[in-house]
Amino acid sequence: MMMKSIRYALLLLAVSAFSTSVMGQNVKEVIDSVKAGVKAGSVKEAVSTVKGAFAEKVATAETIIGTWVYKEPAVLVTSGRIIVKAIGNASAGKLEDLLTNYFEKANITAENTYFTFNKDGTFIRCVAGHKAEGHWMLGDKLLLGIHNVQTAAVTQHLEDGELTLVVSAGKIMSAMVSLGAIHDTTTNNAIVKLSKKLKGIEGGFCLEKKK
């Protein structure tokens, strides 16, 4: 009985530490994962399962093939390959507002912004009507290169049929410019200032697959 109590205490401690690291988001997934780990009868397996609930949603080369159309701004918090939506966080909400206003100013819409990833490693990107072709490669990051020059190293996340492409907040503006959008100094300064308040915050595009 004592060993069982110690096991559960360790499990709760480990999960609590991990939950804090992902800012308490996706609570249902954490709970479901913990239940799965408890059934496995191992604290180590339980924590591993919890981490897997988030890490497994990173996009793979096979899953991003096709054309993805702009839907809305995206804000995520990342730690290595662990990715969560920062729902309810004030800094994340502010970043989303800044991106919404910037995208409107830059005329980024579903009609003129999309990414097409081909099986042969080539891609076409069109941002605010500015089109270019290049090559892509997927490792820990999605690498996009045009004319043999890397233009962006992007964190990719695939969930519920939506592909999210984000970069660290401090690099958002330079990434947008490299992809063909306009530079906005006021927005950039506000984003950089905001990025210092929340470690791991990233922003960019939420895309949906063209049918």
Image: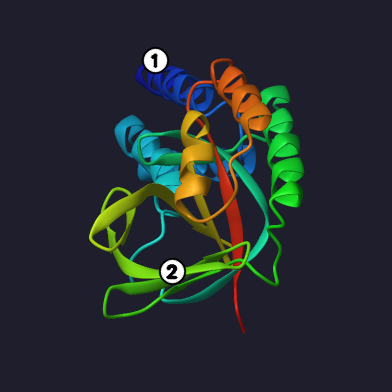
Classify 165 as above or below 27. below
Residue found at the far bottom of this picture: 211
**Residue occupying image coordinates x 29% and y 48%:** 140
Q: Which residue is mark 2?
A: 132
As rendered, which of 205 and 15 lies closer to the eye?
205
From the viewer's perspective, is the residue at label 2 or at label 1 nearer?
A: 2
Q: Can you give x and y, in whole percent of width and height, for residue 122 in the image?
A: 31, 74
As rendered, which of 66 and 109 lies closer to the eye?
109
As rendered, which of 169 and 177 lies closer to the eye?
177
Residue 68 falls in image quadrant: bottom right
Q: Which residue is mark 1?
A: 2
Q: Earlier in the sequence, mark 2 or mark 1?
A: 1
Q: Can you give x and y, in whole percent of width and height, for residue 87 in the image?
A: 69, 35
Secondary structure category for the residue under label 1: helix
**Residue occupying image coordinates x 54% and y 16%:** 196
Classify 50 as above or below 23. below
Residue 126 falls in image quadrant: bottom right
Residue found at the far left of this picture: 148
Secondary structure category for the residue under label 2: strand
Classify 199 as above or below 77. above
**Residue occupying image coordinates x 44% and y 53%:** 156
